[in-house]
Amino acid sequence: MTFAAPPRGATSPHRAHIRHTNRTNHPRCRNTHPYACHFDHTGRPGVSPAPAPRYDAGGRWTVPGRARPTAQAGGPNPRSRRASVPAGTLYRGREGMWSWVAHRVTGVLIFFFLFVHVLDTALVRVSPEDYDKVVATYKTPIVALLEYGLVAAILFHALNGLRVIAVDFWSKGPRYQKQMLWSVVGLWLVLMLGAIYPVLGHAARELLGS
């Protein structure tokens, strides 16, 4: 049994699934990317061609009829989560981040205190009278409050520095860093309560006139 060859010019049934090669000249491919044609241009009966991807109004490469992925109802939206993070900062507001903020702020305050202390000590050689005037201002109640704040900065910076050393060099430090932070805060509060009378006692006597 033999099969007759198809007439000249007719399309072979075995070549019905061949896609066109000149994609950019096809009438349904002119608005699509020249290297991303997804049409079946053979006109197979009973088979609808796939929709052609194209650029939408926002300039995004999309396929018509295909829904874009969206967040489930009631579920977390990753875009809204990223939008809640303040732009231009690395701090997320957790305990470890706030401890770093306090550590840096207290370090800057201690630096300025040392800078001022070096300047007023240098007045001894320049003008002893001016040095006595500067030292006299340290006995005022306002300066006493500033000294109490200085003690608070030094204590927290020192205690939190020990916690940072433990986190860096102790193998279990990162696991217990939150517990160590609250221990530092508790010890700092106890020490600050004990420093009220030694630091603010003179200021209280000045204000009460005793």
Image: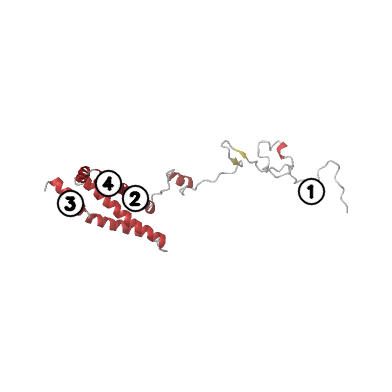
Disc assigned to residue 14: 1
Secondary structure under tag 1 reads helix
Question: Measured along the vertical axis of the image, is residue 1 above or below residue 12?
Answer: below
CA gap between label 1 and label 3 equals 102 Å
Quick one: 100 or 117, which is closer to the camera? 117
Residue 107, numbered circle: 2
The reply to whether residue 116 is in sight is yes
Residue behind mark 4: 122
- Which color scheme is applied? secondary structure
Q: CA distance from mark 2 to mark 3?
A: 26 Å
Circle 1 residues within 10 Å: few <14, some 14–19, many ≥20: few
Mark 1 / mark 3, whichever is N-terminal:
1
The residue positioned 34% from the left and 48% from the top of the image is: 108
Q: Amino acid at mark 2?
A: Gly
Q: Mark 3 to mark 4: distance in Å?
A: 28 Å
Pair 4/2: label in front: 4
Image-based side of 128 in relation to 74, left or right: left
Question: Given this view, does label 4 or label 1 mark the residue nearer the observer?
Answer: 4
Q: Name the residue nearer the viewer: 120 or 166.
A: 120
**Between marks 4 and 1, how big is the CA–CA gap?**
100 Å
User: Element type at marker 4?
Assistant: helix
Q: Residues within 10 Å of mark 3 (few under 14, many from 20)?
A: few
Q: Which residue is mark 3?
A: 201
